[in-house]
Image: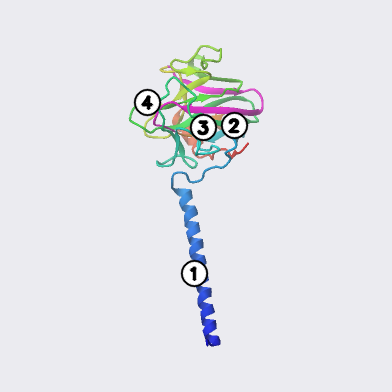
């Protein structure tokens, strides 16, 4: 028969073993959470698969959309969610892993709802990266559409030139590809994330979208060139702190320090 001292010893050992196992479980849980946040293919997927597009709210004439903020990252077609090279913002970026679609927009289309409270004219740029090859004219573009905006076009200030997407009954149209309200939107900088966006081949125009009234508008992108990576879209009024951002260095300095707009399920 065990003495009272033996029982006390056994109880003490069991209590210590329980505490040890609890600590191991806690440490393992913390390590797992940290690992999921900092590595792996998909560190923190959003969860609102019943929605077609997340909602991003404009504030003081600015909306920053992280392209990876989609309702369901398992349903993005030929876009790949990645976080395997440096200097992106947010959780990661999207990479077009599908075929080239130089004349046919609408492949693996992703939508983003933009809630506008300050109507007016906004400039569109993205942070893009040529992630395949060493050419400045390949793997450098996507398709973009604002079908329900008041107007959507390319504009070049030095000669007051406008170009409108084909399929909108407006002219003139951009040089090169365009169809069904979509613009080809490109960049030409190697080896860095670049805040820019142009349309019209060899005839570069900046991208603008007009919202005449407060409300929610849909921005759509679709894949065009294999190997193009996109991190975020910036839609902003060219006024105040954003009035004089005429080169990519100024745009990068202005926007890379800002957090993306909050994404919510509609």
Neighbor class of circle 1 (other Cα within 10 Å; few <14, some 14-19, many 20+) is few
Q: Are marks 1 and 4 in contact (CB under 8 Å)?
A: no
Where is residue 89? Give x, y as percent.
48, 40
- Residue bounds of the magenta highlight: 203-229
Q: CA distance from mark 2 to mark 1?
A: 49 Å
Q: Earlier in the sequence, mark 2 or mark 4?
A: 2
State whether residue 166 is above or below residue 266.
Answer: above
| Disc nearest the viewer among 1 and 4 | 1
Q: Earlier in the sequence, mark 1 or mark 3?
A: 1
Location of mark 3 (residue): 233
Q: Earlier in the sequence, mark 2 or mark 1?
A: 1
Q: Earlier in the sequence, mark 4 or mark 3?
A: 4
| Disc nearest the viewer among 2 and 1 | 1
Question: Dot 2 lies on which element?
Answer: strand
Magenta-colored stretch includes residue 40: no
State whether residue 80 is above or below residue 32.
Answer: above
Q: CA distance from mark 1 to mark 4?
A: 57 Å
Location of mark 1 (residue): 20
| Disc nearest the viewer among 1 and 3 | 1
| Disc nearest the viewer among 2 and 3 | 2
Question: Dot 3 lies on which element?
Answer: strand
Where is residue 120? Give x, y as percent.
62, 24
Residue at coordinates 49% horizontally, 21% vertically from top-left?
183
Magenta-colored stretch includes residue 214: yes
Residue at coordinates 42% horizontally, 18% vertically from top-left?
201
Location of mark 4 (residue): 138
Using the rendered image of the protein, determine whether residue 184 is visible from the camera's viewpoint: yes
């Amino acid at each position: 028969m065990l003495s009272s001292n033996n029982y006390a010893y056994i109880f003490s050992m069991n209590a210590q073993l329980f505490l040890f196992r609890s600590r191991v479980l806690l440490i393992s849980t913390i390590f797992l959470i940290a690992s999921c946040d900092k590595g792996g293919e998909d560190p923190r997927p959003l969860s609102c698969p019943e929605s077609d597009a997340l909602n991003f709210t404009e504030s003081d004439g600015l909306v920053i959309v992280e392209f990876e903020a989609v309702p369901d990252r398992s349903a993005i077609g030929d876009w790949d969610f990645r976080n395997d090279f440096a200097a992106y913002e947010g959780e990661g970026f999207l990479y077009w892993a599908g075929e080239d679609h130089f004349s046919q927009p609408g492949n693996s289309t992703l939508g983003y709802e933009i809630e506008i409270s300050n109507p007016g004219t906004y400039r569109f740029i993205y942070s893009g990266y040529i992630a395949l090859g060493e050419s400045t004219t390949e793997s450098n573009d996507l398709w973009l559409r604002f079908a329900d905006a008041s107007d959507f076009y390319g504009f070049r200030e030095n000669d007051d030139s406008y170009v409108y997407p084909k399929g909108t009954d407006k002219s003139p149209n951009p040089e090169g590809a365009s169809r069904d309200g979509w613009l080809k939107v490109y960049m030409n900088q190697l080896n860095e994330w670049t805040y820019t966006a142009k349309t019209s081949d060899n005839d570069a125009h900046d991208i603008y979208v007009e919202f005449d009234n407060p409300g929610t508008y849909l921005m759509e992108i679709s894949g065009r060139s294999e190997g193009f990576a996109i991190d975020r879209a910036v839609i902003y009024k060219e006024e105040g702190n954003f009035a004089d951002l005429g080169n990519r260095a100024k745009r990068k300095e202005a926007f890379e320090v800002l957090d993306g707009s909050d994404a919510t399920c509609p």
